[in-house]
Amino acid sequence: METPNYIKALLMPNGRKPTGRRVWSIDLEMVWLPFFTATNTMGDTHISPDALGAPLRLAYQADGSVKFSKTGRPVTKVAKDLSDNIRLVRENFTAGLINYANGVIAENPDGYKAQVEVARKAGEPIIRKDKQNLEQALAEAMEQAIAEAEGKGEVKAEAKAETVAEAKHKTREKVGATA
């Protein structure tokens, strides 16, 4: 099986880094809008002109009021027509990747198994090191939490003793004032 050109093209760096609003981690203004405008032009899609002209919409609550995030900013969402087509492209893209992998597995199972084994062996020391570092970090965090809890216990005991002493002092003052 020869690797299709569209798969090869996916693996080539192109140097461009879009910086605008992203949908499915792909720039809306620089990629999705030109793409869907082109597919509409060719008659492959029928995305409404208002979705392409105003792709970002203000989000609303169920009661019709404008929706705000916890930071106080108004929430925006991608127009449904556009969002639905992006989801379709994503699902088809994923299916294409799976079909390609299955084709390679069917045509060259030994080569695929060999790649899996090489990757597994190469990953073992990394996994082992990460596991050790995680165990060490968890042990240190546990020790710190215990030390803090014990420290807070001492602080609480000291605070309680101070409160009891203050209460006794106030009681003495009251008793002295009434005597």
Image (spheres, rainbow, N blue to C red):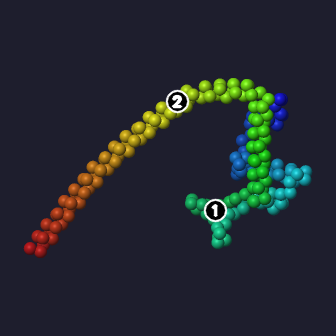
- Across and down, in percent, residue 6 comes to 82, 37
Q: Give residue 146's quadrant in the image.
A: top left
Which residue carries the number 2 mark? 128
Q: In the figure, 163 relative to 130: above or below?
A: below
Q: Residue at x 86, y 57 (%)?
A: 46
Q: Name the amino acid type tagged 2.
A: Arg
The C terminus: image quadrant = bottom left
Q: Residue at x 69, y 25 (%)?
A: 114
Q: Give residue 56's quadrant in the image.
A: bottom right
- Callout 1: few (<14), some (14-19), or many (20+) C-alpha neighbours within 10 Å? few
Q: Which mark is residue 83?
A: none
Q: Is residue 40 left or right of residue 31?
A: right
Q: Name the amino acid type tagged 1.
A: Pro
Name of the residue lying farthest toward the right? 42
- Callout 2: few (<14), some (14-19), or many (20+) C-alpha neighbours within 10 Å? few
Looking at the rendered structure, the secondary structure element under dot 2 is: helix
Which residue carries the number 1 mark? 74
Residue 13 appears in the picture as rendered: yes
